[in-house]
Amino acid sequence: MANKVRFYHLWSIRNILSTVVVSMLLVLMLGTYFYYPQLSNYYKRSRFDEETNGILLNIEERTVINQTKFGNKLNVLHYEITYKFDVDDNGFTHTDIVSATLVNKKALDKAWNSDKKIAVKYLSNNPEHSMVNLESM
C-alpha cells in the first residue's frame, strides 16, 4: 500500500490553475478567430453617427478557385457592394467590401430581391466616409 501514488501528488493547486488558465486562453483565441468579422464590423459601425437609406446598385462576388486533391473548389472571398445615398441634397456613390459570411449573404439577397434599399451609416461631418449596415435589415 505504501507504493501507491495518491491523487494529491498528481493534482496540485498549481496544476489545476495552470490547466484552467490555458483552457480559458484557448477558448478566447478560438472565439476571437471565429467572431473576428463580426467584432470588426461592430467597431467600424460604432464610429459612424448618422444613418440613412440608400439604393443598392450592384453586388459583385469576388471568388477564387482552389485546386484540391478531390477537384477544384470555388470560394467567395468577399462581396463588393456599390450603393448610392443622399445627404442634404448631395448624392454620394460608394463601393464597400463586405466579408463573405452566411449572414451577410442572406441580408444581401434579401435586399437585392426585394426593393434594393439598404441602410447606410456615415459620418455627419464627412458623408463620403460611409458603410453598409446589413444588421439593420
Image (cartoon, rainbow, N blue to C red):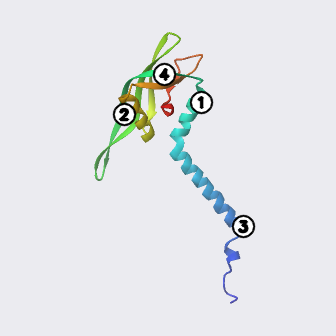
Residue located beneath label 1 in the image: 46
Q: Position of residue 112 (x, y in %)?
A: 37, 29
- Find the distance from the CA under tag 1 to the CA under tag 4: 17 Å
Q: Nearer the viewer, residue 18 or 37?
A: 37
Q: Secondary structure at mark 3?
A: helix
Q: Residues within 10 Å of mark 2 (few under 14, many from 20)?
A: few
Amino acid type for the residue under numbered disc 4:
Asn
Q: Earlier in the sequence, mark 1 or mark 4?
A: 1
Amino acid type for the residue under numbered disc 1:
Ser
Residue located beneath label 3 in the image: 13
Q: Nearer the viewer, residue 127 or 33?
A: 127
The reply to whether discs 1 and 4 touch (Cβ–Cβ < 8 Å) is no
Depth check, mark 4 against mark 2: the one in front is 4
Q: Earlier in the sequence, mark 3 or mark 1?
A: 3
Q: Secondary structure at mark 2?
A: strand
Residue located beneath label 2 in the image: 62
Depth check, mark 1 against mark 4: the one in front is 4
Residue that sits furthest to the left in the current view: 71
Residue that sits furthest to the front in the current view: 114
Q: Position of residue 3 (x, y in %)?
A: 67, 87
- Find the distance from the CA under tag 3 to the CA under tag 4: 58 Å
Residue located beneath label 4 in the image: 53
- Image quadrant where residue 15 sits: bottom right
Q: Earlier in the sequence, mark 4 or mark 2?
A: 4
Vertical placement of residue 31 versus 108, above or below = below
